[in-house]
Amino acid sequence: MSAAAPPAAAGPALRVTGLTVAYGGLPAVDNVSLQVRHGQVVVLIGETSSGKSSLALAVARLLPAAAAVGGLVEIAGTDLAALGAKQARRQRASLVGYIAQDAMAALNPVLPVGRQLAEMFTVHAGVSRAAAAERAVGELARVRIDRPRQVARAYPHQLSGGMRQRVMIAMAMALSPPLLIADEPTTALDVSTQAEILALVGGLQAETGAGVLWITHDMGVVAELADWVAVMYAGRLVEQGPVQEVFDHPLHPYTEGLLRTRRDLRAGRPGEPLYQIAGSPPGLTARQGGCGFAPRCSRRTGVCDTTAPDLRPAEAAAGSSGGPSPRSDTAGRLAACHHPLSDDSAKTAVTV
Amino acid sequence: MARTMIRRLGFGVIAVLGVAVLSFLLEFVIPGDPARAIAPRAQSAAVLRNITIQLHLNRPLIIQFLDYFGQLFRGNLGTSYVQRQSVTSLIGPRLATTGELALAGVIAEVILGGGLGIVAALYPRVRAAVSAVNLTLLALPQFVVGLLLLLIFGFKLHLAPVTGGAGPAEIVLPALTLGLVGAPWYAQIVADQMGDSLASAYVRTAVAKGLPDRYILWRHVLRNVLSPAITMIGMDLGAYLSGVVTVEVVFGWPGIGLLAVDSLQDLDRPVVMGTVIVGAVAVVFFNLVADVLRMYVDPRTREEQA
């Protein structure tokens, strides 16, 4: 069942270079570069309006026409934007599977879920309706749905939230694309269903060797699922690296703040105030020059207000790093901060 | 689902009875003496008295009421005061004639309105133009549209008959009138529903699945527009069958509406009652049919009412 990942020569599952998404001239995503290797789970974390969903939609080429997209998105070496509309449509589902946040809204309410799955095969594989229906049942079984034959005949509103999300996942993976994009697919689910979905995607991903770009605002998901974490703030990537590295030695004050809120949530005693990052992220219209996080940052100096920091390699950002980390994978470890936390100042870091 | 239907049917029967009782009582509020209407030149009081007794109009209201509804429950709509034949035999052919017009009218408004709505939803540039057309049609009364069509296509261009009557050539203009007047409602609801559907997450999913645009339109979008359109078709069919009075009068279309107007002028109470009851039954029936069809196209409505 496991589809072999395309040869490495085709390029990584996803390579995003200098991606910019603007709505009416206001950038929601600002010059973001990112990579997802085959078999790798990259979790992109950020608050509401950080631009993470715009990034996900831009990668899947699902943004409305009103959004201006710049930069390069290559999925397994293919740039969908460079293809003609027809070619792009034909190839997109075999290149990238998109798992939406709200499966109830993302499934057509008046069609049985089996048919919504089967149409992937009638349209793309050109098989008969009966054969496609049979394959759809197989796909439902693959996402561990009991009695798939019965579920295939059900309408979305007759299924539980977890089941609907499984159907979405089955649809996204139907053509075994090298890249999956999951846009906060567990947000609307209860905690135990959330865990099931995470385990399911983790399992399927390991089985198929697909790269996964998982969007979330939940640090717990990062810890659960990620190989690599990218932190987004006000439309920019502010930090990225292997998940253990980032958790142990956050470089950006924003990342550190996120980790502290998580630590407080997990270990805080009743009655003790939870840590909060002061202020709130800037809206699209409130962004000016300088570091987007500066107004909320305790390490802010004059330069933060005038110059936006570039994403730089960890060594350059943190000065001398304190010896090799357990994973010692500091390649691609980047942070965008004028005053990154060095090891000694990162004592508040969290171990997972 | 069956239980829902039975309950709806029960409500329908109550509605029809309510309408019948109300219109029965209203007949007696209308000033005028049916006997005088029947025999306008019979000056003799004795003749009038005779007619009144023959029609049982001398009996107390409550007796007349019980008498009428007793007959109604046996399926008897009574006998026309004027035509001296059973109301059922009078209404039957008229109902068929109006049925033809109602059906043709609904087809016309679905095509015109649906077309306008789809165009408005798919091409944002013409949306303003479609709105203007909608507004103009909404503002025009039915009889104005009818007379305009009659003037242009009948009297000026001689493309359509102007003499009235029912037939394949005669049906075109009245059906078009119904279509033009009804179209804006369909255009609005289709444009709104399609706009919602096109902007929906499930259409985005369909795009992500790499489905062709036309396939998405037919399989995913229009299926979601069907449900409200069916409700409206059911309402219109019922309403038109209960008599498209204005259009029938303008075009001389010998339907149930024309019959109702004539018998109202003649104070022919049994016939008026008959047209009202048949109309009420038509409204209830077609709304019921629309509900059933809606359950078929939209699975969500199946459980909602259960």
Image: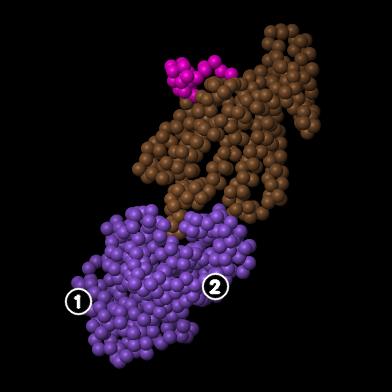
Chain colours: A purple, B brown
Identify the residue at image location x=40%, y=56%.
A89
User: Which residue is drawn at the image coordinates 71% and 33% (left, top)?
Assistant: B21
Look at mark 2 in the image and give the residue it sits on.
Answer: A193
The answer for which chain carries disc 2 is A
x and y, in percent, of residue A295 in the image: 28, 73
- For residue A295, say whether it is visible: no
Rendering coords of residue B279 (x, y %): 65, 32
Q: Amino acid at mark 1?
A: Gly
Which stretch did the figure color magenta?
B146-165
Say which residue label 1 marks: A302
Q: Determine if residue A25 is in view.
A: yes
Amino acid type at image mark 2: Thr
Q: Disc 2 or disc 1, which is closer to the eye?
A: 2
Q: Secondary structure at mark 1?
A: helix
Judge left or right: residue A148 versus residue B73.
Answer: left
User: Of residues A337 and B125, which is closer to you in this image?
Assistant: B125
Q: Secondary structure at mark 2?
A: helix
**Dot 2: within a 10 Å radius of its alpha carbon, few (fewer than 14), some, or many (20 or more) residues?**
some
Residue A271 on the magenta span: no
Percent coordinates x, y for residue B25 in the rendering:
70, 29
Q: Residue at x 52, y 74 (%)?
A: A200
